[in-house]
Structures are given as C-alpha cells and as structure tokens.
Amino acid sequence: MGLFTKDIKTMDDLFVHQLQDIYYAEKQLLKAIPKMADKASDPMLKQGFLTHLDETKGHVKRLEQVFEMHGVQPKAIDCPAIDGIIEEADETAGEVEDKKVLDAALINAAQAVEHYEIVRYGSLVSWAKLLGRNDCAAVLQKTLDEEKATDKKLNTLAESQVNLRAAG
C-alpha cells in the first residue's frame, strides 16, 4: 500500500497507516541497533546504543498499546524509508576502516534514524489530538520525547569527542 493509495480515505486511515509504518521501523531497529553497538569502538557510543535498544523495546510496546487503544490489531507494513536508512548505514560502515571515523559514521546513521522517527512520532501525536485521541497522543508523546533526547545525546557525543577524534 503506497502512501497515496485509495486505501487511505480518512485522517484515521492515515493515522493507522503511519502507526503501522513506525511499528515496522521500530521492529527493524531492534535488529539493527545491536549491530551498530557491536561496531562502535567508543564506550559511550556503545552504551548509548544499548540504552536506546532498551528504549526501542519500550517503543514497540507503546505502539502496541496505541493500536489496542485505537481498536486496531498491531500490524507492521513495509517502510522503505527505514530500510533505506539502515541499508545506507550498513554500506557506509562497511566502507570505513578507521574505528574512530566509523564511530562518527555510526552517529550520523543513528541521527538519520532519530530524525525520521521524530518526524513520524511528531505527526502521529498531532494527528491523534486532531482525531480526539489525547490518550493515544500522550503515549506517543513519551516516545517522541525519548527520540528527541536520544538525538540530543548523539549530537553532544559527536561534537564533544567522537568527531574530534575522527578528524585526528
């Protein structure tokens, strides 16, 4: 189902479609984050990935809660955007030999994921409110806040030490 197909007729349809999209994305990230943690050489970056892995497990549970609250079965639909971001991260990581530079590349890839998630969750929160589902919006807002905090931590880590080490 494409974003602008006839299957999406209402704002509620769009809301559910995007829930399914981000549900898929979070489940893919449960597989990708451990690989990123394994590749990281910076101890703070490695720990940050592992912490976010635990948070991501919580994001999946929250999405399942929102599906249930909204009266819809949890279902993931393919998300080419997250697949592309993960694929690009894998390809880039495979091309970088210097571990310090690899850490910078991993942060960049992780921030691309975070920015994607921030956009999705931001829209979902807004749409849930528009649909009169403040209960769903509150649950989704928790995840949005965590995604923003993760992005900020990654940025701080990159600017305070990882990028400097990578630059030599």
Image (tube, rainbow, N blue to C red):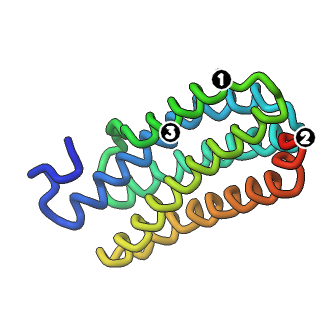
**What type is the residue that disc 3 sits on?**
Ile
Q: Which residue is mark 3?
A: 85
Tell me, yes or no, whether the two marked residues, 3 and 2, touch with CB atoms within 8 Å: no
| Residue drawn at (46%, 54%) of the image | 65
Tally of numbered discs: 3
Residue 168 — which label? 2
| Residue drawn at (87%, 37%) of the image | 42
Horizontal side, residue 49 vs residue 19: left or right: right
Question: Could you say where residue 133 lies in the image, as x and y percent from the top left?
Answer: 36, 73
| Residue drawn at (34%, 54%) of the image | 18
Please tell me in which quadrant of the rendered image residue 57 appears.
top right
Question: Could you say where residue 34 lies in the image, as x and y percent from the top left?
Answer: 69, 29
Residue 95 — which label? 1
Disc 1 from disc 3: Cα separation: 16 Å
Horizontal side, residue 45 vs residue 29: left or right: right
| Residue drawn at (87%, 44%) of the image | 44
Question: Could you say where residue 47 lies in the image, as x and y percent from the top left?
Answer: 83, 41
